Amino acid sequence: MALTEEFLSDEIHPIDIVETLAEHHEWDFDRVAEDQIAMAVEGQWRTYSITLAWSPYDETLRLICSFEMEPPEDAMSELYAGLNAVNDRCWAGSFSYWAEPKLMVYRYGLVLSGGQSASPEQIDTMISAAVLSSERYYPAFQLVAWAGKTAEEALQIAIAEAYGRA
């Protein structure tokens, strides 16, 4: 059954869709407010904190996927170079480092202007892309922060998509 089949009305609130997806995937979640939900999604490297919020003002469903990271101060300039290199490779969403809370953050906004509705498949893809991008680049960020690798050296180990079978 397609995810869309669970929703019969075109006027379903996007966060209601996210809540149904979280239940479907058995993710821990908390409906923070009518327009916001927070989830914990388990990855290979770590558990990612994902928050989705609906902004009716600009009709955007905003996703933030974050994980803690406390790089040493002397690694920060290379980490920022790594962020720029990673963002050059990301077509949907982008990474930034929030220094005060010590969080690496992947952000994406789905614009639904003109009264458009998000489909469950679109939202599921948003969440999957956030986790897959975080999983792909997490080792590179760690190598820059803790192993003294340059951004380009670290990106060489970023997990590439596999094609075919082994």
Image: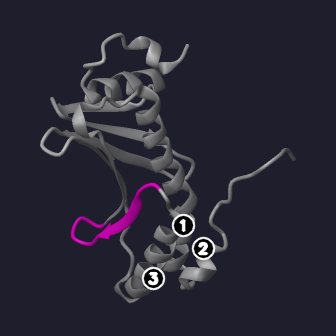
**Would you say residue 95 sits in the magenta stretch?**
yes
The magenta span reads 92-102
Which residue is tagged 2?
A: 155
**Position of the N terminus by quadrant:** top right
Identify the mark nearer the N-term, 3 or 1. Answer: 3
Q: Is residue 164 left or right of residue 3?
A: right
CB atoms at circles 2 and 1 under 8 Å apart?
yes
The label nearer to you, 2 versus 1, is 1
Identified at 49% across, 59% down, the residue is 91
**C-alpha distance separating marks 3 and 1:** 13 Å
Q: In this view, does 145 lie to the left or right of 65?
A: right
The label nearer to you, 3 versus 1, is 1
Q: Height in image: 21 above or below 141?
A: above
107, 147: nearer the viewer: 107
Disc 3 secondary structure class: helix
- The amino acid at mark 1 is Arg
**C-alpha distance separating marks 2 and 1:** 10 Å
Identify the mark nearer the N-term, 2 or 3. Answer: 3
- The amino acid at mark 2 is Leu
**Would you say residue 93 sits in the magenta stretch?**
yes
Identified at 85% across, 44% down, the residue is 165
Residue 10 x, y percent position in the rendering:
30, 18
Which residue is tagged 3?
A: 81
Identify the mark nearer the N-term, 2 or 1. Answer: 1
Which residue is tagged 1?
A: 89
Disc 1 secondary structure class: helix
Residue 39 x, y percent position in the rendering:
34, 37
Identified at 43% across, 42% down, the residue is 126
